[in-house]
């Protein structure tokens, strides 16, 4: 099966390239990676058709996005074009050719004000609190319209996820290691947000789940054209909980002081309750609890700590 992945050099894109590369159904050549040079979100309407005709994938996983949430808040119109219109252009090109599309989306399509302790379900009303969430919701809506069109073929899966961690540019765990080392040197405590809750999700685990959905032909239920999945790590955590977990794993003995998110002024407002209720993965267990995934990731964190220690000594 021919699979193409947009944003193939990003955090999730790298994990997808590895997971689909290992999947027997993608054959010896593995998936096709469409990086920024191949599929520029600023030029999607022009390039989507040409790329699909050139590589003729049967499934496209759309992981590319403008993920700078504060940048999106400063230029909401650009965010809408990159995360909304570009997704729409890709979806229309795929639907016209009967290509299945998986659009990666986010918990930030919800406003995060929920107070009943439950995670957001796919049919809960969306209502983004920031420009990034609004632009991603626009992408979901344009993709759905493309596959709802009378002449559309193929199927659409919207996969919402949250709080991704994994190899790539510094993620939350790596930033906490850096901040923890700094606090240790200064003999101070570390401030971490105690009133933001989410579901940390390991890119490796999410990528494996997507391979499963594609391999089992379960991206969309039989007879349906469009599906929404919530795929996140098991359990939940505050940012402060997650920071304590990270510090413990790399042996940094630093006290975490919980502070409100409003401590730092930001262009974007993150949702306080970033918790998604996971949807069932047909024939497969849900993703493992996030601390188990962190245990696997800890080696990478410890290596980064060792590397920074040797840089400091040099
Ligand atoms: N990170 C999270 O916590 C999180 C949570 C929920 C959902 N998501 C969603 O998950 C997906 C993957 O996110 P990620 O964490 O892997 O983000 P990432 O590491 O920032 O990767 C984003 C990818 O998009 C590409 N990209 C950015 N701007 C582009 C442009 N103008 N044209 C073409 N490509 C462009 C990047 O290319 P370069 O490599 O060249 O920069 C990169 O490959 C996104 O759809 C995001 O909205 C992320």
Image: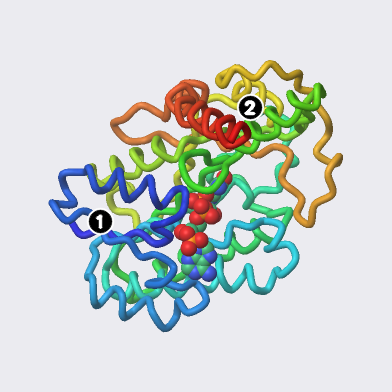
Q: Which residue extends farthest bottom?
A: 46
Corner quadrant of residue 236: top right
Please determine whether, in this image, residue 93 is positioned above or below residue 137: below
Quadrant where the N terminus is found in the figure = bottom left
Whether the residue carrying mark 1 lies under 8 Å from ligand 1 is answered with no
Q: Position of residue 165 (x, y in %)?
A: 52, 38
Q: Which mark is first along the chain, 1 or 2?
A: 1
Q: Residues within 10 Å of mark 1 (few under 14, many from 20)?
A: many
Between 227 and 305, the residue placed more toward the observer is: 305
Q: Position of residue 20 (x, y in %)?
A: 27, 47
Colouring used for the render: rainbow
Report the residue at 68% width, 63% height from top: 72
- Residue 140 visible in the displayed image: no
Report the residue at 83% width, 34% height from top: 260
Report the residue at 68% width, 32% height from top: 197
Q: Position of residue 308 (x, y in %)?
A: 58, 34
């Amino acid at each position: 099966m021919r699979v193409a992945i947009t944003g193939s050099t990003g955090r999730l894109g790298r994990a997808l390239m590895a997971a689909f590369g290992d999947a027997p159904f993608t054959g010896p050549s593995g998936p096709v990676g469409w990086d920024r040079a191949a599929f520029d979100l600023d030029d999607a309407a022009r390039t989507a058709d040409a790329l699909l005709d050139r590589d003729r994938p049967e499934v496209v996983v759309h992981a590319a996005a403008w993920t700078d949430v504060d940048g999106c808040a400063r230029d909401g119109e650009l965010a809408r074009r990159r995360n909304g219109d570009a997704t729409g252009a890709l979806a229309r090109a795929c639907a016209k050719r009967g290509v299945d599309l998986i659009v990666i989306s986010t918990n930030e399509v919800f406003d995060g004000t929920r107070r009943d302790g439950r995670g957001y379900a796919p049919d809960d009303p969306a209502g983004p609190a920031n420009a990034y969430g609004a632009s991603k919701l626009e992408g979901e809506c344009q993709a759905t319209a493309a596959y709802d069109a009378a002449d559309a073929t193929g199927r659409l899966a919207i996969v919402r996820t949250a709080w991704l961690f994994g190899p790539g540019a510094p993620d939350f765990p790596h930033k906490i290691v850096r901040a923890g080392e700094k606090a240790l040197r200064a003999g101070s405590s570390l401030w971490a947000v105690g009133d933001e809750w989410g579901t940390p999700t390991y890119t490796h685990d999410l990528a494996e789940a997507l391979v499963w959905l594609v391999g089992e032909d379960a991206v969309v239920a039989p007879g349906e054209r469009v599906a929404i999945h919530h795929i996140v790590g098991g359990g939940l955590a505050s940012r402060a909980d997650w920071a304590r977990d990270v510090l413990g794993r790399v042996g940094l003995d630093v006290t975490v002081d919980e502070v409100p998110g409003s401590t730092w002024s930001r262009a974007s407002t993150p949702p306080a309750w970033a918790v998604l209720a996971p949807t069932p993965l047909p024939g497969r267990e849900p993703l493992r609890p996030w601390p188990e995934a962190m245990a696997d990731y800890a080696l990478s964190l410890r290596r980064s700590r060792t590397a920074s220690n040797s840089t400091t000594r040099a």
